[in-house]
Image: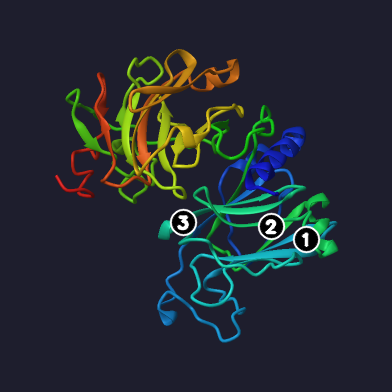
Amino acid sequence: MFTMYRLLALAALAAAVLSAEIDPSLTEWKKIDRGVEIVKFPLNKYTLQIKSFRSNVPEHGGDPIYANNTVVDKSTSMLVHYMVDGRRIGQFVWNTIPYVAGTDVILFGCQAPYSRYRSEPCNGEFEQIWSWNFSKGGAVLTCFDTVQYEVDFARARNPSCKNMGSLNIEKLRFTNMAGFYYRAAPQPEEQEPPTDGPEDLRITSPEPTTATTLPPTTTPMPVGDINPTCNCWTRECGYCSKLECAVKYDLTNADTGITVNSVLNRKDFNYIKLYNGEGKNIGYFKWNLKAIFLEGCIFCRSPRMKSILKGDYNEWNFSMKGGVIKLSVGGESFYERKLGRGCRTHYEDVQYFSFQRMSCDSSFLVGDGMERGSLMDRTCNGQCDA
């Protein structure tokens, strides 16, 4: 059975071999200035990321309905043609909002290409980060790490779809996307395919880091207090780019780590974002009832999630002192692994953390040495009740 995790692993391996050919400037956000714009982009080697903005479309009340269920409204859609030898050979289209009727995402030329989103795309956020992952095995579309569409090239009946993974796609043609941004997300060279399915803990590479604005001051927090996990994915927090919405904490040398009591389900992930002393996001730890991920360096194996997680609430402790990753649930240790040299260097200076896409129902325990940013008060700057 084709799975998203095999797909991503294949993409990573293909990218590892060819990454030296990629212009590093592709990993920086670039604005699409025109209604039709052609750019050099090796789609089979890098993940295509698009930063878009949710459409308002007041004339449709935010949910366009079309008579034939296939019409695409230009005010809500994004269209990308992929090109080989200067010729357009295919296209994919997706929307910034879900349709009541009609098509949310299409990869033309493949079996059953017309598809609806699996859930509210991008959690309904105005600013959206989409990722298209193409490999020899298939294609996956995600927004904020939530899969909304996937197709298996090998199982397709159409020959053009079967061959899509072997095409040397060299250019992309953006249409109806002026004002949006694009970039490439390289895959880590050290990755190997997972051997035990999607429920293993995986250590992979983070998105390209972005500098944050260092807070002018931090305030010591009373040890032992229980504070809400303030969501940093807000405009006031610069969508997790401002350390005023983070906790200062030397996680690399801390004995106790970070203890979180979180509300979990099997679909949505909770995030702890990690920053170095310069305020750059260097990775994140994410988890739900199915899987745990630490964005870093290599795939590694762990116990099955079903033996770890039970119920909606779980008390997690995550630590990485001395380059050793440790996970425990309810005080019971479940996982320990020493990071390899490259990963240990990558995480040798974790000085801040913040919470992304977590509600006021979740909380964390204040450990010795934690200091909060100015917007990390007990109400999360008004997001939560005191």
Report the residue marked by disc 3.
122
Residue at position x 68%, y 45% from top? Answer: 7
Residue 90 at what x, y percent from top left?
76, 64
Question: Could you classify mark 2 by the number of other residues whose Cα lies within 10 Å: few (under 14), some (14-19), or many (20 or more)?
Answer: many
State the separation of the CA atoms marked 2 and 3.
Answer: 20 Å
N-terminal of the pair, mark 1 or mark 3, is 3
N-terminal of the pair, mark 2 or mark 3, is 3
Left or right for 20, reference 341: right
State the separation of the CA atoms marked 2 and 1.
Answer: 8 Å
Left or right for 11, reference 276: right
Question: Could you classify mark 1 by the number of other residues whose Cα lies within 10 Å: few (under 14), some (14-19), or many (20 or more)?
Answer: some
Could you tell me if the residues under marks 2 and 1 are in contact, i.e. CB atoms within 8 Å? Answer: yes
N-terminal of the pair, mark 2 or mark 1, is 2
149 relative to 347, above or below? below
Q: Image quarter for residue 368?
A: top left
Report the residue marked by disc 1.
156
Report the residue marked by disc 2.
151
Q: Helix, strand or loop at disc 3?
A: helix
Residue 246 in sight? no
- Residue type highlighted by circle 3: Cys
Residue 135 at what x, y percent from top left?
73, 47
Q: Disc 1 vs disc 3: which is toward the camera? A: 1
- Residue type highlighted by circle 1: Ala
The residue nearer to you, when weighing 33 against 226, is 226
Q: Disc 2 vs disc 3: which is toward the camera? A: 2
The residue nearer to you, when weighing 181 against 345, is 345
122 relative to 216, above or below? below
Residue farthest toward the left in the current orientation of the protein:
386
- Residue type highlighted by circle 2: Val
111 relative to 340, above or below? below
Residue 126 at what x, y percent from top left?
41, 60
Left or right for 304, reference 60: right
